[in-house]
């Protein structure tokens, strides 16, 4: 594996840099990308976001977040470097790179990463890709001891990824380094409580109603160790929440006493999208991989095509029941 110094050298010699991330970007994808965008612009580099996704509302406090508008799908012609953050495989990149001939740098923390870049920097011990973007930004020569608003803007984005990918520092992926970086960001002037409020105390009213609808149909299966939550087709449209991030709903299932795995099934046009979360020892990445998905041991996702919600649920429960002894 290469080191951050090599990546930094590639970045500094590049003329025009596109930045992208995984589709349906979460706080870490957004945070790592916007921190790097803010840092590159502070260094005077010509850089921009490539994304077919639109940013969700709770990230709009981040600097340059308005540039994640779903309008730049491919690299501009003169782009000589594309950096993809927090994305395990090419199919999931929120950019169309099929006719792009330049270099791709892949920076990620998914253990399943497919090393699709010309340079790959994969650290599965990082709680969030934001840990890696922070280290990279320092390597690029930005000194966080000298404080100003532009550096705080970088810090806010990094802190966003740390908080969201660690469940507010509660998951087992948190390390001493995670807290060290968080501490340095607070020292820099990041207002942790402000970031947290923007992220979590900022739900549209309809989102809370959606939680109510989903929770009213929650079921416990496999000896009450698996919580199943469902969003049938039409529910999001009815509440006008097509672009809403639903990842927080799944953690409510995991909060139930005795539950080991929580799954949220969402019926979409092409099939059923499922998120999986595990509390202790069940490796949900392995479950997701059986149907072509991936992720982390305690947080994974899978898309099953041309299938109804009941069949998608039964497929996953079968694997959980057979392969993982609850
Ligand atoms: Mn991540």
Image (spheres, rainbow, N blue to C red):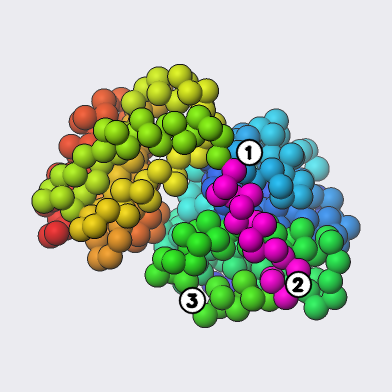
Counting from the top left corner in percent of width and height, residue 163 is at: 55, 61
Counting from the top left corner in percent of width and height, residue 223 is at: 11, 51
Residue 118: numbered disc: none
Horizontally, residue 14 falls left or right of residue 260, namely right
Residue at mark 3: C-beta within 8 A of ligand 1: no
Stretch in magenta: 185-202
Residue that label 2 marks: 188
Q: Residue at x 70, y 63 (%)?
A: 191
Q: Which residue is more in the foreground, 3 or 228?
A: 228
Query: Does the magenta-highlighted stretch encompass residue 33?
Result: no
Q: For the residue labelled by badge 2, is the local secondary structure a helix, a strand or a loop?
A: helix
Q: For the residue labelled by badge 1, is the local secondary structure a helix, a strand or a loop?
A: helix
* Structural distance between the alpha carbons of marks 1 and 2: 25 Å
Horizontally, residue 293 falls left or right of residue 222, namely right
Query: Does the magenta-highlighted stretch encompass residue 190?
Result: yes
Counting from the top left corner in percent of width and height, residue 87 is at: 52, 52
Crowd class of label 3 (few under 14; some 14 to 19; many from 20; radius 10 Å): few
Q: Residue at x 63, y 61 (%)?
A: 193
Residue that label 1 marks: 57
């Amino acid at each position: 594996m290469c080191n951050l110094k090599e990546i930094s050298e590639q970045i500094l010699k590049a003329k025009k840099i596109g930045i992208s991330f995984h589709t349906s970007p979460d706080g870490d994808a957004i945070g790592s990308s916007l921190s790097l965008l803010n840092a590159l612009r502070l260094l005077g580099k010509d850089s921009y976001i490539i994304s077919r996704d639109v940013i969700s509302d709770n990230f709009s406090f981040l600097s340059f977040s308005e540039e994640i508008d779903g309008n730049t799908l491919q690299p501009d012609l003169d782009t000589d470097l594309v950096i993809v953050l927090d994305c395990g495989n090419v199919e999931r990149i929120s950019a169309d790179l099929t006719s792009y001939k330049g270099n791709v740098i892949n920076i990620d923390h998914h253990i399943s990463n497919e090393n699709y870049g010309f340079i790959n920097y994969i650290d599965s011990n990082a709680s969030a890709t934001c840990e890696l973007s922070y280290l990279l930004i320092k390597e690029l020569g930005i000194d966080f001891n000298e404080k100003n608003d532009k550096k705080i803007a970088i810090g806010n984005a990094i802190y966003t990824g740390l908080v969201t990918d660690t469940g507010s520092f509660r998951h087992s992926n948190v390390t001493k380094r995670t807290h060290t970086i968080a501490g340095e960001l607070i020292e820099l002037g990041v207002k942790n409580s402000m970031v947290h409020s923007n992220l979590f105390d900022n739900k549209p009213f309809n989102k809370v109603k959606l939680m109510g609808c989903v929770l009213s149909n929650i079921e416990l299966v496999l000896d009450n160790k698996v919580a199943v939550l469902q969003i049938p087709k039409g529910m999001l449209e009815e509440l006008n929440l097509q672009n809403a991030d639903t990842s927080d709903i799944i953690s409510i299932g995991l909060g139930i006493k005795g539950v080991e795995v929580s799954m949220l099934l969402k019926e979409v046009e092409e099939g059923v999208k499922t998120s999986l979360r595990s509390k202790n020892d069940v490796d949900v990445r392995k479950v997701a991989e059986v149907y072509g998905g991936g992720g982390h041991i305690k947080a994974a996702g899978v898309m099953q095509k041309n299938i109804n919600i009941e069949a998608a649920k039964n497929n996953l429960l079968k694997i959980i029941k057979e392969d993982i002894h609850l």
